[in-house]
Amino acid sequence: MIDLAAYSPAVQAGALVGAVLLEAVALYVGYGAVEQVAKPLVERITHT
């Protein structure tokens, strides 16, 4: 874990916003990949 306590509040806030943004992008990409895999599977199951 990175210790940001020594930095100014503005740097801490920027790091938090950056971490949340990075997490959001990772989840967006991850859920997109899951959708690409699951969508054909669900369609195949529902149409049989």
Image: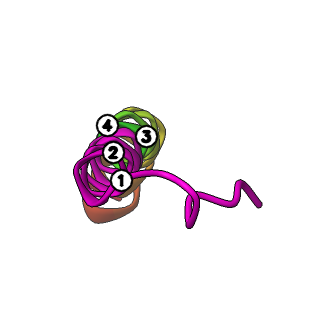
Q: Residues within 10 Å of mark 3 (few under 14, many from 20)?
A: few
Q: Please say if the residues under marks 2 and 1 sit with CB atoms less than 8 Å apart.
A: yes
Percent across and percent down for residue 35 are 34, 44
Q: Which mark is residue 26?
A: 3
Q: Amino acid at mark 3?
A: Ala
Q: Secondary structure at mark 1?
A: loop
Q: Please say if the residues under marks 2 and 3 sit with CB atoms less than 8 Å apart.
A: no
- What span is in magenta? 1-24
Q: Residues within 10 Å of mark 2 (few under 14, many from 20)?
A: few
Q: Which residue is mark 4?
A: 25
Q: Which residue is mark 1?
A: 8
Q: Which residue is mark 2?
A: 11
Distance CA(mark 1)–CA(mark 4): 26 Å
Q: Which tag is nearer the camera, tag 2 or tag 4?
A: 2
Q: Residues within 10 Å of mark 4 (few under 14, many from 20)?
A: few
Q: Residues within 10 Å of mark 1 (few under 14, many from 20)?
A: few
